[in-house]
Image (cartoon, grey):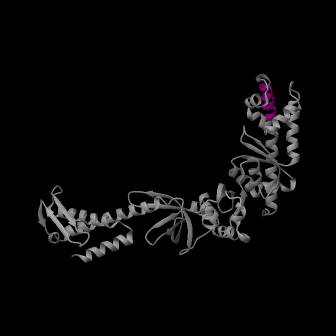
């Protein structure tokens, strides 16, 4: 009985998470290669069998018993090289099989070194993963030996290595953190319906509860903000806005723009755009620092959002009315119907084309063509003027930022 061989195989199987039977098969293959090397013939019939219970080795050449121990040093070296290659191959396959189905999961590891900006993370004392610089949260740095949590983004297999790519910037990283920190999310009582993120800065998340007794927003925030605080701390202070999901796009857009309060939301389904009216004192909140609030709200709701003050809204409607009232057959009722369609400005009208005017409002094709042609002419003039105004505004903002630091939202 060869107990030493059994012990070595069991240790390798345990340490490298390789199937025990695969190691015995590798040993048999290595011994066959060594014997063929010894006899100098690749086509010679060599058979090796290892008893996986006792460790006893039985070898045969052309059906005759063969003593493997008598082959010498060079065949033994060949067997060693083949064995190393086979075990490395089995180890790669074991790592790939273990992690390929865990993509999207959160995993903990220890930062052991940096390579060109990418952090190398030890996952389980035998497997290393890569956290690329592009997947690291801006503004956060991790020191050697630090314990961090990441999401398994991808697992790639190549000829010589298995690459496990980690991420802390992917939106699903936030989703998984909520599943861990908020039991109701993990139990699917609360569903994360939509999520928009600018990693390191701000995230908006829309949630819906399937249980009337469970407040979706309150459960995610936790008592005195305990649950959300754990997630924010994990993300290095990244702001997280939790809003209520609503099947009504108007309600959802209004919720997504919080903390700003919206006075009116008009939807234009033909353009996929929403015009939101907010009071002057809510304008900066609605837009957010560097446009971040409205940008995330647009991604969360999947609507292009245009923010206007009441004065700007009225000016657009007046321009629309003034530009069309000279057309024969057009009256105030038509303007009201346009506004009901979410068409607030001449630019919107020029973009939607004739079809909505014919199908939704009931204009005859000739009149619809006249209206759109007029809108296109007015839009050309307005675009030039508006472009000049926008340029001036941007220049003014740039000068203001040079003279004083931007206010934090």
Residue 77 position in % (x across, y down): 23, 69
Left or right of residue 34, residue 260 in this image: right
Residue 260 position in % (x across, y down): 80, 56
One can see residue 170 in this view: no
One can see residue 189 in this view: yes
Picture quadrant of residue 368: top right
Q: Residue furthest left?
A: 64
Q: Is residue 198 above or below residue 72?
A: above
Total numbered labels: 0
Tell me which residue sits at (35%, 63%) in the image.
Answer: 90
Left or right of residue 400, residue 2 in this image: left
Picture quadrant of residue 44: bottom left
Q: Residue furthest top?
A: 366
Tell me which residue sits at (28%, 64%) in the image.
Answer: 26
Q: Is residue 379 magenta?
A: yes
Q: Is residue 118 magenta?
A: no
Q: Quadrant of the C terminus?
A: bottom right
143 vs 34, nearest the viewer: 34
Residue 210 position in % (x across, y down): 67, 56
Q: Quadrant of the N terminus?
A: bottom left
Q: Is residue 277 above or below residue 173?
A: above
The rendered magenta stretch, by its main secondary structure, is classed as helix
290 vs 248, nearest the viewer: 248
The segment highlighted magenta reads 368-380
Residue 224 position in % (x across, y down): 74, 71
């Amino acid at each position: 009985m060869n107990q030493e061989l059994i012990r070595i195989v069991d240790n390798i199987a345990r340490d490298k998470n390789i199937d025990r039977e695969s190691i015995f098969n590798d040993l048999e293959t290595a011994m066959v290669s060594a014997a063929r090397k010894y006899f100098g013939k690749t086509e010679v019939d060599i058979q090796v069998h290892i008893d996986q219970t006792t460790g006893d080795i039985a070898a045969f050449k052309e059906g005759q018993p063969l003593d493997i121990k008598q082959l010498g040093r060079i065949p033994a070296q060949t067997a060693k090289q083949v064995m190393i290659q086979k075990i490395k191959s089995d180890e790669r396959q074991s790592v790939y099989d273990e992690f390929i189905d865990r993509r999207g999961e959160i995993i903990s590891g220890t930062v052991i070194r940096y390579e060109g900006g990418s952090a190398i993370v030890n996952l389980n004392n035998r497997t290393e993963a890569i956290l690329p610089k592009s997947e690291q949260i801006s503004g956060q740095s991790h020191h050697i030996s630090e314990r961090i949590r990441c999401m398994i983004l991808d697992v790639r297999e190549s000829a010589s290595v298995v690459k496990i790519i980690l991420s802390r910037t992917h939106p699903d990283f936030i989703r998984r953190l909520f599943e861990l920190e908020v039991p109701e999310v993990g139990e699917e009582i609360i569903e994360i319906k939509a999520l928009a993120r600018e990693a390191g800065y701000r995230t908006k998340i829309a949630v819906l509860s399937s249980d009337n007794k469970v407040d979706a927003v309150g459960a995610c925030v936790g008592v005195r903000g305990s649950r959300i605080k754990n997630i924010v701390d994990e993300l290095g202070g990244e702001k997280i806005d939790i809003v209520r999901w609503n099947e009504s796009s108007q309600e959802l857009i209004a919720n997504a723009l919080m903390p700003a309060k919206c006075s009116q939301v008009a939807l234009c389904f033909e353009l996929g755009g929403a015009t939101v009216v907010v009071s002057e004192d809510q304008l900066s909140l609605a837009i957010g620092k560097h446009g971040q609030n409205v940008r995330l709200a647009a991604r969360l709701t999947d609507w292009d959002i245009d923010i206007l003050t009441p004065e700007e809204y009225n000016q657009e409607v007046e321009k629309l009315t003034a530009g069309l009232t000279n057309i024969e057959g057009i009256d105030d009722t038509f303007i009201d119907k346009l506004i009901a369609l979410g068409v607030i400005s001449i630019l919107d009208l020029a973009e939607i084309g004739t079809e909505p005017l014919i199908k939704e409002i009931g204009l005859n094709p000739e009149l619809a063509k006249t209206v759109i042609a007029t809108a296109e002419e007015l839009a050309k003039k307005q675009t030039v003027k508006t472009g000049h105004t926008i340029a001036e505004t941007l220049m003014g903002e740039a000068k203001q930022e040079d003279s004083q630091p931007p206010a934090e939202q």
